Image (tube, rainbow, N blue to C red):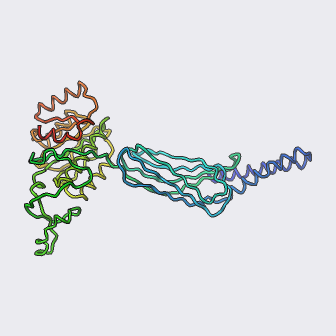
Amino acid sequence: MKRMKSISSIAGVIGIGVAAYVFAKFQGSFVSWFIFYMLLPFVLYSILLFFYPLSDLKVERKMTTRRLTREGKVTIRLRITRKLPFPLLYTVITDRREHAERERITQEIVLWGFKRQHEFSYTLTNIQRGEYTLKAVEIETVDFFNWIKKRRVFAIKDSFLVYPKLTELFYQSASSSANEGKKASAYSLTKDAAMPSGVREYAPGDRMSWIHWKSFARTNKLMTKEFDEQKSEQYTVLLDANASPDFEEGLEFAASLLVSAKDHHAMLTLLIAGKNPAQFPMIHSAESTQQALIHLAKMQPDETNHSELPRLKVDQGNILLVVTGNLRLEFIQTVLQSYPNPSSIVCFVTTTEVSEELQSVIQQVKQLGIKVQLISKANISSALKEAVTS
């Protein structure tokens, strides 16, 4: 179909030239020949453009970063080069990207001329969490009167990942020990544990200072020191994937919990409830934390209001931290079926406005013996400490 349309276009251009020549030949007046010679350059250019190969163009895409956090920015540069200096007129450059199953485009219209190289850059600001896939670059050029239109798609695939925005938390040990009030940086290890209480097998991401060299010399097997603090701090975080206006805030709070626990050498398990439940048990190393953060970065809210929990038996000695942006009684009842210990459950609810309906649900959840902690921008840093120590 496209080929037939292309052939009909060039046939139409040649027909215009022939018609102008025939008219001038038979008319023989100055005006008729003037019209012919006026049309001739445009007709010749259109014919040459038809035979100009857009495969001569080479496209490269570069990005300033491939990992950033929500509300950050990234600059994307396109570099287009060619060998033949054929004059191109109106050229439209389109970069296509996909996020959350929606396609977006960025375009530039340029009067190319004889240049062998052209660079086009644009910046995406206030970017939202998720995986962005840049699928292709489309280049389209036309002649003076849009008689001939040429288009080529360059399949250049790139991607970048936008992580949840992390918040510094006042981390509180699950054992309510002497860690109260210590502030954790979202990305840096803040301290070393003091006294080792045992050893375990080395896991990727463990620090070199934790290696128990005496065991290595004796068994020729890498072993890592285990600390009392590591054993005592046991949290299980259950993130509700149900769609809500405050879903992003809840997800970012769960991600901040992961990083803070890792920074304090605490053991943590992440569960995700929804249509596609997921689990990340025993997160303690940088590698396992990174895997969980990648999953959170790619995760999209569940619009089906499905509350299926992953099939993982939660240790009854752990404190279960439920994070949701849409508190509802049926979801809490589903949680209690898998974890029938309400006194060890803390429910964090992210909300910007406490409605009467929400207040009613909170009272019903509290009557079940579950502690409820509201999270807002004002108290997100201290929410964990307040919930565990109150």
Place residue 320 in its image quadrant.
top left
Asked if one can make out residue 316 in the rendered structure from this viewpoint, the answer is no
Q: How many marks?
A: 0
Task: Please give the name of the residue rendered at 44% of the width and 48% of the height, measured from the top-left corner.
Answer: 98
* Residue 27 place in picture, x, y as percent: 91, 45
- Pick the front one: 380 or 10: 380
Place residue 273 in its image quadrant.
top left
Q: Quadrant of the C terminus?
A: top left
Instruction: Spot the residue most to the right.
Output: 28
Q: Is residue 389 left or right of residue 206?
A: left
- Pick the front one: 104 or 253: 253
Q: Is residue 99 left or right of residue 78?
A: left
Q: Is residue 71 left or right of residue 49?
A: left
Compared to residue 226, the image places residue 140 above or below, namely: above
Task: Please give the name of the residue rendered at 25% of the width and 26% of the height, measured from the top-left corner.
Answer: 355
Asked if one can make out residue 137 in the rendered structure from this viewpoint, the answer is yes
Place residue 306 in its image quadrant.
top left
* Residue 31 place in picture, x, y as percent: 88, 44
Instruction: Spot the residue most to the top.
Output: 356
* Residue 4 place in picture, x, y as percent: 65, 52
Q: Is residue 371 left or right of residue 76?
A: left
* Residue 127 place in picture, x, y as percent: 40, 45
